[in-house]
Amino acid sequence: MDTAATPHSNYLTDGYSLKSWLLTRDHKRIGLLYLFSVTAFFLLGAFFAGIIRLELLTPAGDLVSSDIYNRLFTMHGVVMIFFFLIPSIPSVLGNFLVPIMIGAKDLAFPRLNLLSWYLYTFGGLFTLWALVTGGVDTGWTFYTPYSSSFSNSNVALVIVGIFINGFSSILTGLNFIVTIHKMRAPGMTWFRMPLFVWAHYATSLIFVLGTPVIAITLLMVGAERVLHLGIFDPKLGGDPVLFQHLFWFYSHPAVYIMILPAMGVASELVAAFSRKAIFGYEFVAFSSLAIAVFGFLVWGHHMFVSSESVYSAMAFSLLSFLVAIPSAVKVFNWSATMYKGSISFEAPMLYVFGFIGLFMIGGLTGLFLAAIAVDVHVTDTYFVVAHFHYIMVGGAIMMYMGGLHFWWPKIFGKLYNEFWAQVAAVTIFVGFNLTFFPQFIVGYLGMPRRYHAYPPEFQLWNILSTAGATVLAVGYAMPAFYLLHSLFKGKRAPSNPWGAKGLEWETTSPPPTHNFETPPVVTEPPYNYAK
């Protein structure tokens, strides 16, 4: 274990005033600003989820009215997807780690990076304003013509919030792409880059190419709502199916915005806790790019019941099956990496095992939804709810938590309680499965999503789901205590507490303001654990 001393000055001690944080151009401090922001939105989204699960505990719909229920699940979806799941890993861990991992002093455009956080914050504030003044009831998909013509909730205000937030994603993606192209340390060739950086490069391509589509689409919904232009409303000559094409053209790749960075985290953790180089490094790297490309070709499988032609449906079904290939490449290669590896079971690795299990269930049930006949049967049921929670929540959050634990000693220079971290990882895994696996069953049996009351024969599955949500909430709450405790009472972290490979472990914990005391030169391949 490395026991290098902490330097006298680091990015945390380089100014204590509020101004030094709010005007900082240090990518590490901006990563922490995002950490506080996305955590706040996660708590808000989790609060909405808790009320939803309490409402569904009984079949009668007796806790809140149907109108309030519509607003609850809409705000849960909007907050969780646009303000937590999409920005969490890229904006927190990516901001902190990408420059350090490639040996750079900062991102290419530090001021633009700070502007991205402000745009994210202002977008969030607009959305919160919509919440306190009545909320929105359209579902996070904003399907027209309900969102453009009939809803009397705060649709326009939420659209403005998401539109502003979209610029934050675009600028962050642009910053990562330029940084990775132009600011790599001497010797850091493309195939010496950590797979975490490859994953963020692919994610950034989706940010830059896809986000403008959803931003303009929602802007058109707002324009039609205010100016009655006739873009989506059939009464005015518009086409509501056009909205679905535009919305899902972005929103399916958005799934990969959430899961690709999680896969990047998994690659780092599998290598570190197996003490082996990633099996088939090049295949894993290129599979990230393949997922980014295929992600733009499969939007039509969300529209099998939206008057899509049989031939279009067959094409989108085939493409949806094909996108499973690069995802499977990653899982197979992680498994091959662990084979005969010296595996240790610290908390971050437990999150990896949980991630692989949940992602496999989510991925395999995605094949069900790519099959046209099965998709027609389970469309808009809880089967779909369970599937996307396994991918987007089970996948992305498990690796966000795993990455946060893995790099916590590097970020703050403090060690956390490993025992409680392991207990939390297991609790989250158990709670998650108890929450969402019953939803596959109740969805297959026919319970539709977005209903606040349901037939009594579905109650058992909903009781299990609500009980699981309680366990899950306990699991998510535990890290808040032991991680905060570590900041005040935790032992000082050495530079490399895990014995891992990578430039971030060659600098001190926490890193100095400019990341490295002397500019690094890369002379060996990544994950060189045989050395």
Image (cartoon, rainbow, N blue to C red):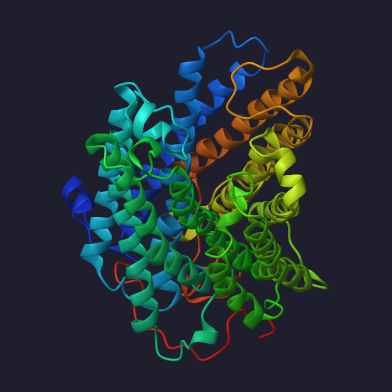
Residue 447 in sight from this viewpoint: yes
Tell me: 482 left or right of 281. left
Work out whether 62 lies above or below 19: above
For the residue pair 473 and 360, the one nearer the viewer reads as: 360
Q: Quadrant of the N terminus?
A: bottom right
| Residue farthest toward the right in the current orientation of the protein | 340
Q: Position of residue 465 (x, y in %)?
A: 70, 27
Q: Is residue 30 above or below residue 221?
A: below
How many labels were placed on the picture? 0
Hey, which quadrant is residue 239 in on the image?
A: top left
Left or right of 413 on screen, residue 467: right
Q: Picture quarter containing residue 339?
A: bottom right
Q: Is residue 116 above or below residue 425?
A: below
Q: Residue 361's spot in the image, x, y percent?
A: 75, 50
* Residue at x 32% of width, y 53% of height: 216
Relative to 79, is 132 on the left or the right?
left
* Residue 214 sits above or below residue 410 on the image: above
**Toward the viewer: 233 or 269?**
233
Q: Position of residue 52 (x, y in %)?
A: 56, 23
At 41% from the left and 35% from the top, the residue drawn is 145
Tell me what residue is drawn at x 55 percent, y 24 percent: 50
The C terminus sits in image quarter = bottom right
For residue 285, what is the image quadrant?
Answer: bottom right
Compared across the picture, whether 386 is left or right of 141 comes to right
User: What residue is at 64 percent from the left and 33 percent from the top?
Assistant: 472
* Location of residue 318 in the rendering, given as x and y in whole percent from the top left corner: 70, 64
Is any part of residue 508 visible from this angle?
Answer: no
